[in-house]
Image (tube, grey):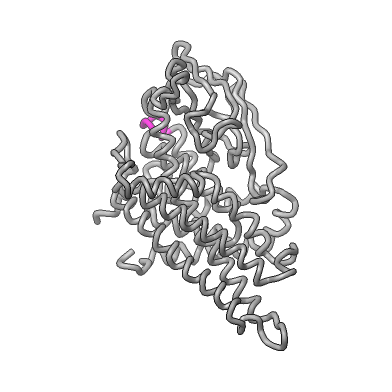
Amino acid sequence: MVGFELNEDHSLLEQTVREWAGREVAPRIHDLDRAHRFDRGIVPHMAELGLLGICIPARYGGAGMDYLSLGIASEELEYVDTSLRVIMSVHAGLNCLTLLAWGTEDQKQRYLVPQAQGEKIATYGLTEPSAGSDARGIQSVAIRKGDRYLLTGEKMWISLADVADNYLVFAWSDLEKKKQRDPSGISAFIVERAFKGFSSGTLKEKWGILAGNTGFFKMEEVEVPAANLVGREGEGFKIAMFALDQGRYTVAAGATGLIRACRDASVKYALERKAFGHEIGSYQLVKEMIAQMESDYQAARLLWMRSGWLKNMGRRNTRETGLAKWFATVASERAAGDAVQIHGANGYSDEYPVGRFYRNCKGAVIYEGTREIHKIMQADYLLGYRTDRPARCELPAWEGARG
C-alpha cells in the first residue's frame, strides 16, 4: 500500500475474495442463516484461497501476505455475512497470529503449519459463564502433574467451539494467585479436541450470526502435555491481551464491510422504492442516513488500515486497534439500524438482508471488548492512566515491510 492506494496484490486479493464470497456464499447465506446452520464446507474453500493462513509466513504454511491483507479479506467476507469474518477472526487472528508470536518452534510446526494450510481449524477460549470483560474472573484451572497439566473448567460463547480441532485455552496455573486475582497466575495452553476429557456443544439460543457456530466446551481433567504451554507459566494474561489485539483488528475491518453492505443495500432500495410519488432516496432524511453510512464507512476504513500499517511495521498498536474496533462496530450498529429504517416494513421482514445485518452487528459491539471497555481505554490513554508497555513477544513485522 502506497499512501492511500491499494497496491496490486491488495487489489487482486480484494477482487478475488469479493468474487468468491459473492458467487459461492451470498446466494446461500439466507438459507444457512434461517436454518441456523454452519457450513463447514466453506472452510476448505477459504483454505484454497490462502485465507486461513493469510499473513502467516510461507515457512509456516501461510500465504505470506501482509496484515493489511488480513483486514481487506475480513472486510470483504463480512460484506456477505458476519459468520465468514468470524472464521478469520478466531482462526487467523486470535489463534494463528498468537502462535506465530508466542509459540515455540515445535508448536509452530505441530499446530501453526496445519492451521495455516487449513488442515486444522483453531479457535480461542477465554470467556466463561462467569467471566467476560473481567478476564481475571475465569475459573478454569491447570494443575501441573509431572510433564503434563490437568485442565478443568468450562468456556462459553466460543466461536467455532463445536467444530474446531485446536483451542488456545487460558486457565489459572497458580491457585494462590487465583485467590488474589493476580493475572500473573494465568497461563495459556494448546488443547486438542481429541484430548480425553474434552467435550463441546453448540449454543442454540443466540439471535445473531446464525450461520456461524458459537458454543461452549468443557474440560474435565484434560491431560495437556507441558510442551503445549504457550509462553511461560504466568504469561497467559499477556498472551490473551495480545491475541485480542489481533482479533479486534479483524472485527474492526469486518464491521467496516458490514457498514458498506448496509450502505449499498440502502442505496439500492432508496432508488427503487417510491412513496408519495417519488423515490424515497429523494427525501432529505433518507439522504441523511445514507450520507452518515458513507461517512462512517470511510472513517472506519481509514482507522483499521492505520492499525494494519502499524502491524506491518511491527509497531505496538493496541490503542489504535482498540479505537478502530470501537468506532467501526458502533458505526455498524448505527448503519444497520438506519438500513432497517430506510427499508421500513420490508426491513423488518426476512425478505431483505438488512434484518440479518441488524442481528449480526450487535455481537461485535459486545465481544472482544464491549464499547464501554473501549471508551474507558481511550479515555485512559488521554488521561495518562494507561500506557502500553511492550510485551515479551510482539507481532513480528511483516517480512516484506522493509523491502
x and y percentages locating residue 101 in the rendered image: 36, 38
Examine the structure image and report whether residue 202 is included in the region drawn in magenta: no
Q: In the image shown, does 23 or 235 lie closer to the viewer?
A: 235
164 left or right, relative to 380:
right
Task: Look at the image and tell me in which quarter the N terminus lies.
Answer: bottom left
- Give the residue displayed 59% in from the left and 55% down from the top: 361
Does residue 224 appear to the left or right of 38 in the view shown? Answer: left
Whether residue 108 appears in magenta in the rendering, the answer is yes
The residue most toward the left is 402
Residue 166 visible within the image = no
Q: Residue at x 50, y 61 (%)?
A: 256
In the foreground, 226 or 324: 324
Extent of the magenta region: 103-109
Left or right, 206 with respect to 316, comes to: right
| Residue ID at (51%, 28%) | 137
User: In the image, residue 375 lies at what x, y percent?
Assistant: 44, 49
Q: State the residue at coordinates (53%, 69%).
A: 293
Instruction: Count up the numbered dots.
Output: 0
Q: What is the quadrant of the C terminus in the image? A: bottom left
- Whole-percent x, y for residue 393 in the image: 32, 36
Farthest residue in the top direction? 146
In this rendering, the answer to whether 372 lies above or below 293 is: above
Name the spot of residue 351 as percent of width and height, x first: 74, 66
Rendered position, 93 above or below 358:
above
